[in-house]
Image (cartoon, rainbow, N blue to C red):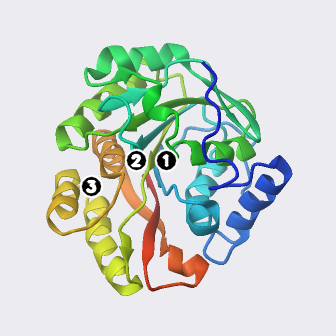
Amino acid sequence: MNRKPAVAGSFYDSDPIELRKLIEWSFLHQVGPGSLPKISAVKKPRDNLFFVVPHAGYIYSGPVAAHSFYYLAEEGKPDVVIVIGPNHTGLGSYVSIWPKGEWETPLGNAKIDEGLAMELVKDGEVIDIDEKAHMYEHSIEVQIPFLQYLFQDVKIIPIVVMLQTPDIAEFLAEAIYRLMKRHQDLDIVVLSSSDMNHYDPYDITYKKDEMAIQKIQQLDYKGLYDVVENKDVTMCGYVPVMVSMILARKLSKKAYILKHATSGDTSGDKSSVVGYLAARFGS
């Protein structure tokens, strides 16, 4: 049940030393936080439970993603990280969970929390056990080395979503909400993996992204769905983000935008860009 990396050597370095350097470059980049994260040594109640992270190649989206991981580190190591990403490959079920074993990366192996994963399958109604959907999918994989850079022996629950509708987001959010209520002794964090608008010129992408970001700030998840469906905003992981928005509403959290940028801000080519967003949901 070990999942081998699918995009090591393309989206990020396959050499562990170079990969660590690339992650540190992401934190130190002018688009990134500008400094390396400091992991809290004192365990305290977590305020920021849900995050938005992009999932492109690190040289493009790594500095933006680093903002969310920077905040995650400040509140210490979570017990479990649920990572929800969109399905780009078209393989597998509408909503697919990897239920057990480990995910391998150049930085080591991340273990699946098998017990909590099966609880989500039981409660989720729409969640299938399906490894096929995960085999070549990058949206979750690229988050794992960042987590491993920050924390030792981090446990994960990977969920990939192909059918992106408000109903699916509601079912997923409710299952995670019940899990968190049953296990209030556990520090559970959700990472919602998504890129923003794709392959328009820089100025157009910024304007389209702002329409979606406004809905995220308002926690208007149905409004976000409407923007994506009817305003030609080609955001790929809108249901993963909607899940965090719904959970934030349930737990009286607010949305805070940490960083919005595009591939043009890191590559310099602004003729056709992809938008990236880092956000947190806290008090």
Question: Disc 2 to disc 3, how far (Cα)?
Answer: 25 Å
Per the image, label 2 sits on a secondary structure element best described as: loop
Taking the image as drawn, is residue 40 in sight? Answer: no
Front label number (2 vs 3): 2
Residue 170: x percent and y percent? 23, 36
Residue 179 is tagged as none
Q: Nearer the viewer, residue 68 or 124?
A: 124
* Res 273 → quadrant: bottom left
Name the residue tied to disc 2.
Answer: 88
Q: How far apart are labels 2 and 1 at the CA level?
A: 8 Å
Query: Earlier along the polypeptide chain: callout 3 or callout 1?
Result: 1
Which label's residue is closer to the chain start, 2 or 3?
A: 2
| Amino acid, disc 1 | Ser
* Quadrant of the drawing holding the N terminus: top right
Residue ID at (42%, 62%): 256
Tell me if 152 is positioned left or right of 119 in this view.
right
Q: Is residue 252 visible?
A: yes
Task: Tell me the residue at 52%/39% (across/down).
Answer: 136
- Tell me, yes or no, whether the two marked residues, 2 and 1, touch with CB atoms within 8 Å: yes
Disc 1 crowd rating (10 Å Cα; few below 14, some 14-19, many 20+) is: many
The residue pinned by badge 1 equals 139
Q: Where 37 falls versus 153 (above or below)? A: below
- At which x and y percent is residue 100? 55, 17
User: First in sequence: mark 2 or mark 1?
Assistant: 2
Query: Of residues 38 and 157, which is closer to you in this image?
Result: 157
Tag 3: Cα neighbours inside 10 Å, few (<14), some, or many (≥20)? Answer: many
